[in-house]
Image: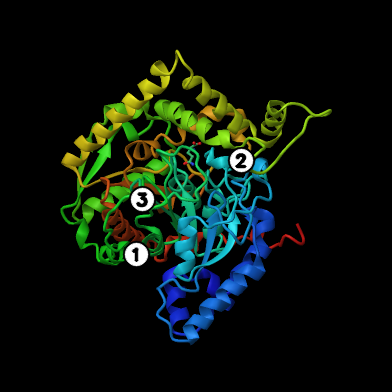
């Protein structure tokens, strides 16, 4: 492994600024890494070496002209395939969009490019971001770099696996019910879901628009913060985008590393987020993290959020309802695939044949569920009730944040599980998001960071931190403080523990 790919984005950015390494070298090193490991990971759906190297060369040229560049200029970035890009195809891991090329870049992608980040590839995901294990991709599952027989979480497993396996220092993700945070937990990386509206959704292929939010995946809290500073902010293309003057998340992360901010910090532990059936080794790491927080001056307070227990049930009404409406546009006329039945047929026959062939099982299941939940006669009973539950969850959070500054929980009740379980136990997979979904229901920010390995399986465990809407910076301050304590305890940054696997050495060519 060359040293370049193991650097944090912050350190790589510094080396680039100092002229010790060029953006072209950084891009090439990561493209080589993708070539050598992705046969086993399947984390990428598309790369375009020519475009990536050209973009990197442009950053090098700007630097040599003495132009003022941002801290991440020349740093490679992997992009979840739910975000449209002009330089590579965008499929949302669906057959229905195979080969689709967008005429424009998503706002977050455009902002990243403007900051000099170099798109090095589109990452695999659950089809249309529906899933928690990445097994719903039409292009095969992603494998977890910690153990290739296990899932990396989902839906953003490709972005998380790419970052964990040093195939990219940074990646973009999207989080509708946990798809940035849960894969971060399962791959030992950092994932951040901003306050709803903090980051533009323009060009993020819509799944459940009132829940979807784009955010950052990284190996350290500071790196996630640096990327967040690049992508945050108002966008007139997105009607739900907030007009808000965001403070620097990187400054927050840097100040957190001193740990002073933990003194007197009120940390809430929500009874309803301490789920039954939590893996013992995950719970042990969580209890240790809480003890570390108190040892550094934080005050831990138990709180009650009675409506959280209905969050998963309400989510699986609201989410399919919105998704069924958003996915109506894949009609064989406007985008992507078209299947004409034998002997021709009406527009409806073509539409139905296309959707039957183009969508995977999970997507169909949710479209059917959502259409049913929205149908006349059932709308109030299902969609209407779920909306009321959503309001009650928001009130639970408001009450909780009246008492505490942040809420802490496990990000996921278990470590990464074996590939193949989703088919035999979809309910278990749905329930894996019980801890992450409430934040999306309330639009509040959430951060997941690694806190150790579970004794049973030596796989990463993630800590989730939640804060009130607009208090995103508090998560970076607190997260960086905890990260620095964990690093000191372990004697090395967490991301260095990923087994750099004999298993991760053969390349696509030999696979
Ligand atoms: N796992 C959840 C789902 O399947 C969340 C997905 C996401 O956040 N994109 O819907």
Q: CA distance from mark 3 to mark 2?
A: 25 Å
Quadrant in which the C terminus appears: bottom right
> Does the beta carbon of the residue at mark 1 sit less than 8 Å from ligand 1?
no
Q: Secondary structure at mark 1?
A: helix
Residue 462 lies left or right of residue 390; in this view the side is right
Q: Quadrant of residue 165?
A: bottom right
Quadrant in which the N terminus appears: bottom right
Q: Secondary structure at mark 3?
A: loop
Q: CA distance from mark 2 to mark 1?
A: 36 Å
Q: Which residue is mark 3?
A: 194
> Does the beta carbon of the residue at mark 3 sit less than 8 Å from ligand 1?
no
**Considering only order in the chain, which callout, 1 or 2, is on the residue closer to the N terminus?**
2
In the displayed structure, would residue 113 be above or below residue 205? below
Label 2 Cα crowd, 10 Å radius (few <14 / some 14-19 / many 20+)? many
Label 3 Cα crowd, 10 Å radius (few <14 / some 14-19 / many 20+)? many
Camera-nearest residue between 272 and 62: 62
Q: Which residue is mark 2?
A: 135
* Mark nearer the viewer, 3 or 2: 3
- Residue 2 on image: x %, y %: 58, 74
In the displayed structure, would residue 66 be above or below residue 27? below
- Outermost residue on the top side: it is 377
CB under 8 Å between callouts 2 and 1? no
Q: Residue at x 59, y 53 (%)?
A: 102
Label 1 Cα crowd, 10 Å radius (few <14 / some 14-19 / many 20+)? few
Q: Residue at x 74, y 35 (%)?
A: 339
Q: What mark, if any, has residue 488 been given in the picture?
A: 1
């Amino acid at each position: 492994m060359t040293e370049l790919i193991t650097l944090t984005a912050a350190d790589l950015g510094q080396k680039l600024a100092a002229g010790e390494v060029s953006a072209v070298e950084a891009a090439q090193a990561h493209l080589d890494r993708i070539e050598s490991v992705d046969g086993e990971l399947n984390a990428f759906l598309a790369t375009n070496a020519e475009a990536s190297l050209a973009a990197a060369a442009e950053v090098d040229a700007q630097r040599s002209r003495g132009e003022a560049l941002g801290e991440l200029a020349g740093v490679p970035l992997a992009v979840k395939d739910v975000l449209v890009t002009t330089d590579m195809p965008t499929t949302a891991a669906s057959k229905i969009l195979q080969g689709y090329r967008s005429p424009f870049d998503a706002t977050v992608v455009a902002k990243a490019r403007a900051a000099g980040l170099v798109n090095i590839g589109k990452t695999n995901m659950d089809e249309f971001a529906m899933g928690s294990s990445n097994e719903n991709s039409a292009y095969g599952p992603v494998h977890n770099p910690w153990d290739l027989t296990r899932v990396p979480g989902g839906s953003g497993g490709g972005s998380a696996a790419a970052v964990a396996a040093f195939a990219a220092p940074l990646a973009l993700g999207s989080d509708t019910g946990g798809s940035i945070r849960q894969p971060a937990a399962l791959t030992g990386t950092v994932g951040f879901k901003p306050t709803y509206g903090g980051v533009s959704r323009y060009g993020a292929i819509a799944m459940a628009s009132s829940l979807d939010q784009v955010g950052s995946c990284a190996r350290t809290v500071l790196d996630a913060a640096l990327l967040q500073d690049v992508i945050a902010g108002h966008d007139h293309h997105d009607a739900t985008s907030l007009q808000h003057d965001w403070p620097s998340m990187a400054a927050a992360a840097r100040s957190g590393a001193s740990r002073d901010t933990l003194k007197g910090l009120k940390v809430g532990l929500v009874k309803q987020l301490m789920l039954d059936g939590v893996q013992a080794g995950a719970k042990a790491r969580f209890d240790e993290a809480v003890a570390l927080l108190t040892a550094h001056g934080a005050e831990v307070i138990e709180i009650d959020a009675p409506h959280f227990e209905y969050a998963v049930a309400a989510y699986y009404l609201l989410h399919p309802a919105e998704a069924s409406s958003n996915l109506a546009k894949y009609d064989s006329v406007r985008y992507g695939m078209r299947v004409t039945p034998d002997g021709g047929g009406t527009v409806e026959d073509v539409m139905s044949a296309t959707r039957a062939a183009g969508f995977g099982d999970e997507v169909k299941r949710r479209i059917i569920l959502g259409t049913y939940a929205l149908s006349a006669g059932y709308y109030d009973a299902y969609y209407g009730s779920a909306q009321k539950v959503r309001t009650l969850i928001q009130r639970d959070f408001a009450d909780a944040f009246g008492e505490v500054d942040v809420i802490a929980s496990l990000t996921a009740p278990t470590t990464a599980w074996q590939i193949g379980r989703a088919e035999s136990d979809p309910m278990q997979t749905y329930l894996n998001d019980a801890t992450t979904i409430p934040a999306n229901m309330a639009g509040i920010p959430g951060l997941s960071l690694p806190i150790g390995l579970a004794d049973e399986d030596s796989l990463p465990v993630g800590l989730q931190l939640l804060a009130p809407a607009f208090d995103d910076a508090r998560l970076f301050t607190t997260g960086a403080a905890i990260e620095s304590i964990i690093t000191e305890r372990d004697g090395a940054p967490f991301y260095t523990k990923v087994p750099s696997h004999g298993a991760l050495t053969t390349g696509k060519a030999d696979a």
